[in-house]
Image (cartoon, rainbow, N blue to C red):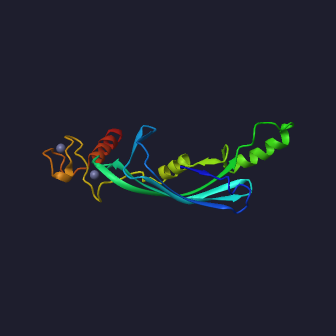
Amino acid sequence: MEVNIGEIKDIRGGEIRFRFVEDWAELDLDGQSLHWVSPVVFNGRVTAAGEVFLVRGTAAADIETSCARCLSPVRVSIKADVDERFRMASHGSSTNSASDQDDEDDDWYQEDVQEFRGLTIHLDDVVLENLLVSMPVKVLCREGCQGLCPQCGKDLNEGKCDCAIDDINPRMAQLGLLLNGRG
Ligand SMILES: [Zn+2]
Ligand SMILES: [Zn+2]
């Protein structure tokens, strides 16, 4: 996903609308495997605001992940509002005295503006980041998923197993032991 801002770069308030629909290969981030099961769609616009270009829009995609309790695959739709700022990277370092220039640069960086080279803004990274942030931390395959038996590993949604844990929540039982031991 990339936008060429050539036609609006000198027009304050100039705008380019876009709609991207792309298939992204399976990505592996921080050991967390992301499996896209739909194309990633990004609808939005770039607006020229002086030296800064505003990218705003909505990104959406379906991913497949696993249920936090029973580990069965779950399909999740994620949607993210994107609102990012970009500026053109300055050409080389032809300026002589560095001090004034540096101050100006610092201000830009503090406002979290990303630089791009040439006339093309690459959007993949910001779309990915925003989608990741919008992902639910914990996904369940259904409300009230029974999860797996901690002893035999059976999927308890498919029926009870023969283990003798009955109604005692194993975590609570462990906590109880711990408290008794300390007390
Ligand atoms: Zn589940
Ligand atoms: Zn069991």
Residue 152 position by quadrant: top left
Residue nearest the viewer, comparing 5 with 147: 5
Give the left or right position of residue 133, taking residue 12 as reference: left
Q: Residue furthest left?
A: 162
Give the left or right position of residue 28, taking residue 12 as reference: left
Please state the horizontal and vertical placement of residue 146, each as a whole percent of the image: 24, 53
Q: Residue furthest right?
A: 97
Residue at x 15%, y 50% (from the top left corner): 160
Does residue 42 lie above or below 152 as drawn?
below
Instruction: Name the quadrant of the C terminus.
Output: top left
Please state the horizontal and vertical placement of residue 180, each as a whole percent of the image: 31, 42
Please state the horizontal and vertical placement of residue 71, each as a whole percent of the image: 29, 46
Residue nearest the viewer, comparing 12 with 180: 12
Residue at x 20%, y 53% (from the top left corner): 157
Q: Which residue lies furthest to the bottom in this view?
A: 13
Does residue 57 lie above or below 122 as drawn?
below
Give the left or right position of residue 80, taking residue 71 as reference: right
Residue nearest the viewer, comparing 178 with 34: 34
Please state the horizontal and vertical placement of residue 170, each as a whole percent of the image: 26, 46
Query: Disc count in the image?
Result: 0
Residue nearest the viewer, comparing 92 with 180: 92
